Amino acid sequence: TALAYYHGDIVRGFKRSQYKQQRTLWSDLLYTQCPRFGMDKVVELKGVNSKSLTEPYKMSLSFDNELYVSPWLTINDGQGRILHYLDVQFEYSGTEIRAVRWIPSYTEEPVGPDERIKTFVEYTWFEYVEKDVRVGLNTLFVMGCVATVFVVMAVALDSESKIMGRAVVMPKIPASQQKATAAKPSHSAL
């Protein structure tokens, strides 16, 4: 399971190596070589003496209790191709690491027999922002309801003015006709 980290916490790292088809066990990285949660930094991994390398020398790194393990990275191929720079990109969300990517950069510079191979590792951190679909859909629903209420009110107000304009107008009956209709006996009295 992933651990919960706070900004600046040391993320324990481990390394192992492979040379002539023999592998070492996992061993701790020095704390000065370990990444710190949410903080970009560049460190130098202590290399091996190059005069003893006649075959490829490989290394693998792991972080977060071996949850994220790198593929075997060739440090020196024995022919002069050397891993000079490794970009380790951490993706995190809140207090957890979500993913790790490894981007190696090689150089063809020859290393003398007594020189130490220098490999630099840059730890970079990227925050993953989750998209909350439910909040987005709820927002759209509420905005749709509000828009519907406004449209219904606008139509009702507009219709009221049109209805008043189209109302049946009763013709005025002249006063002489009103007296004549009032003088007629009603049929109900009979």
Image (spheres, rainbow, N blue to C red):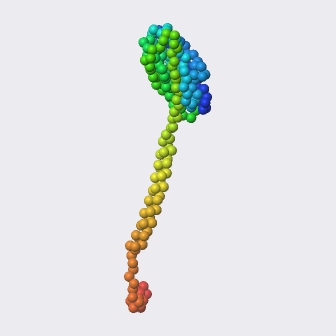
Residue at the image point whose x is 57% and y is 23% from the top: 34
| Image height of 148 relative to 89, above or below | below
Residue at the image point whose x is 44% and y is 59% from the top: 151
Residue 90: horizontal and vertical position, in percent? 52, 29
Residue at the image point whose x is 50% and y is 28% from the top: 89
| Image height of 138 relative to 18, above or below | below
Tally of numbered tags: 0
Task: Judge whether residue 184 can be spotted in this image.
Answer: no
User: Does 7 sit left or right of 177 as displayed?
Assistant: right
Quadrant assignment, res 78: top left
Quadrant assignment, res 63: top right
Residue 187: horizontal and vertical position, in percent? 40, 86
Task: Judge whether residue 25 can be spotted in this image.
Answer: yes
Quadrant assignment, res 39: top right
Q: Quadrant of the C terminus?
A: bottom left
Q: Nearer the viewer, residue 183 or 99?
A: 99
Residue 112: horizontal and vertical position, in percent? 48, 12
| Image height of 62 relative to 112, above or below | below
User: Does 64 sit left or right of 185 as displayed?
Assistant: right
Residue at the image point whose x is 55% and y is 28% from the top: 41
Q: Quadrant of the N terminus?
A: top right
Residue 40: horizontal and vertical position, in percent? 55, 30
Q: Nearer the viewer, residue 168 or 18?
A: 18
Q: Nearer the viewer, residue 157 or 181?
A: 157
